[in-house]
């Protein structure tokens, strides 16, 4: 626990300047590197990291997608094209190496790479929206806050197991408590931001709903990552962060939340946080 707390504090200290200067290329480089490391952790999880036909295109895709999404014009059209080329290559590789390549491994590598890279890329896309700094911070607060709130709620009140086959320690009470407290925290942070910003009014109900949805997605992202690990018979994806594991162990909820929040905010006529 001591190691986990120290590592967590170090992560916060390191993260602060990247958040403050998140409008610069510094955050872009960090996110691209996290995407790359996360994909290689996943490939190692499924036993595909030493196959060049898997590792090289997946690594290049993971590194490029966050940067393409942030800096190039017509980014969504281009991103779709790049994703198609990547999937086509992986399928072609599986076909050309038939007899020596396990197709299920190709499918796992492709789906996992698309999922991880898209999640990290949407962190940058969300940051570039109006009020993007607030939403970037709320992705992190909701993901990590839900984990903490659910843990303590479950510790004190948990009686009914959530999905014991995937995560034996998680409880229904913990999940509900984490969701409600995270939603309330979203509202509180939104009110503080609106007060500091001065020219916007927070839509409190929308904030609560948004916080609750993201908290549920956060927990599902955590369970999905645990499901992959359990199927592969490993405890952690890596050891980059002592006491926390690897990139996917720490950012599994973040990459689940980011695309959902970006989609929710992409059309202000349908859903808006600030009036």
Image (cartoon, rainbow, N blue to C red):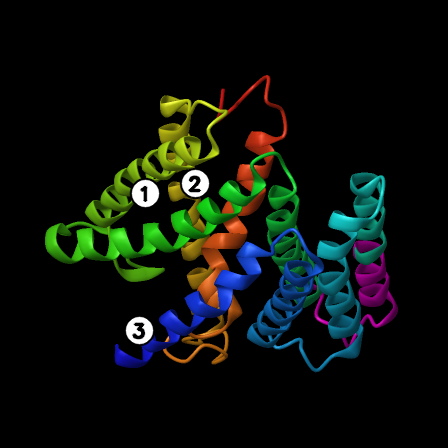
- Circle 3/circle 2 CB separation < 8 Å: no
Q: Is 39 displayed left or right of 151 in the figure?
A: right
Q: What secondary structure is the magenta-colored segment mainly? A: helix
Please report whichever mark, 2 or 1, sits nearer to the chain's N-terminal start. 1
Residue 13: image location, x then y, percent: 44, 68
Separation of disc 2 and disc 1 at Cα? Answer: 9 Å
User: In the rendered image, which residue does mark 1 sit on?
Assistant: 182
Residue farthest along the top direction in this orientation: 269
Asked whether the residues under the numbered discs 2 and 1 touch, taking CB atoms below 8 Å apart as contact, a structural biologist would say: yes
Magenta stretch contains residue 169: no
Q: Can residue 232 be seen in this view?
A: yes
Residue in view at x 32 percent, y 81 percent: 3
Residues in magenta, as a range:
87-103
Q: Mark 3 points at which residue?
A: 5
Q: Which of marks 3 and 1 is nearer the N terminus?
A: 3
Position of residue 15 relative to residue 137, above or below, is below
Disc 2 designates what residue? 214
Q: Residue 77 placed where, x, y %?
A: 83, 39
CA separation in Å, label 3 and label 2: 25 Å
| Residue 228 visible somewhere in the drawing | no
| Crowd around label 3: few <14 · some 14–19 · many ≥20 (10 Å) | few
- Compared to 76, does 234 lie above or below? below
Determine whether label 3 and label 1 are within 8 Å by CB: no
Q: In this view, does 195 lie to the left or right of 104?
A: left
């Amino acid at each position: 626990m001591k190691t986990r707390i120290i590592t967590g504090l170090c992560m916060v200290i390191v993260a602060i300047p990247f958040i403050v200067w998140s409008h610069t290329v510094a955050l872009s480089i960090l996110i691209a590197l996290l995407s790359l490391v996360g994909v290689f952790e996943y490939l190692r999880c499924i036993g595909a990291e030493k196959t060049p036909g898997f590792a090289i295109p997946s690594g290049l895709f993971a590194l490029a997608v966050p940067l393409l999404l942030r800096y190039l014009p017509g980014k969504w059209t281009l991103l779709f094209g790049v994703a198609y080329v990547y999937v086509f290559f992986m399928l072609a590789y599986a076909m050309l190496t038939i007899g020596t390549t396990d197709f299920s491994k190709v499918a796992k590598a492709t789906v996992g790479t698309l999922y991880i890279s898209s999640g990290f890329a949407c962190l940058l896309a969300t940051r570039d929206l109006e009020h993007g700094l607030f939403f970037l911070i709320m992705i992190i607060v909701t993901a990590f806050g839900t984990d903490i709130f659910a843990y303590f709620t479950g510790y004190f009140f948990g009686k009914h197991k959530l999905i014991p086959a995937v995560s034996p320690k998680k409880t229904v009470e913990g999940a509900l408590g984490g969701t409600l407290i995270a939603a309330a925290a979203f509202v509180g942070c939104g009110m503080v931001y609106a007060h500091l910003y001065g020219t916007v009014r927070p839509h409190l109900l929308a904030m609560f709903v948004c916080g609750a949805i993201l908290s549920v997605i956060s927990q599902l992202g955590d369970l999905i990552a645990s499901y992959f690990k359990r199927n592969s018979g490993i405890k952690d994806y890596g050891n980059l962060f002592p006491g926390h594991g690897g990139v996917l162990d720490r950012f599994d909820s973040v990459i689940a939340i980011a695309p959902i929040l970006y989609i929710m905010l992409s059309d202000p006529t349908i859903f808006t946080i600030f009036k």
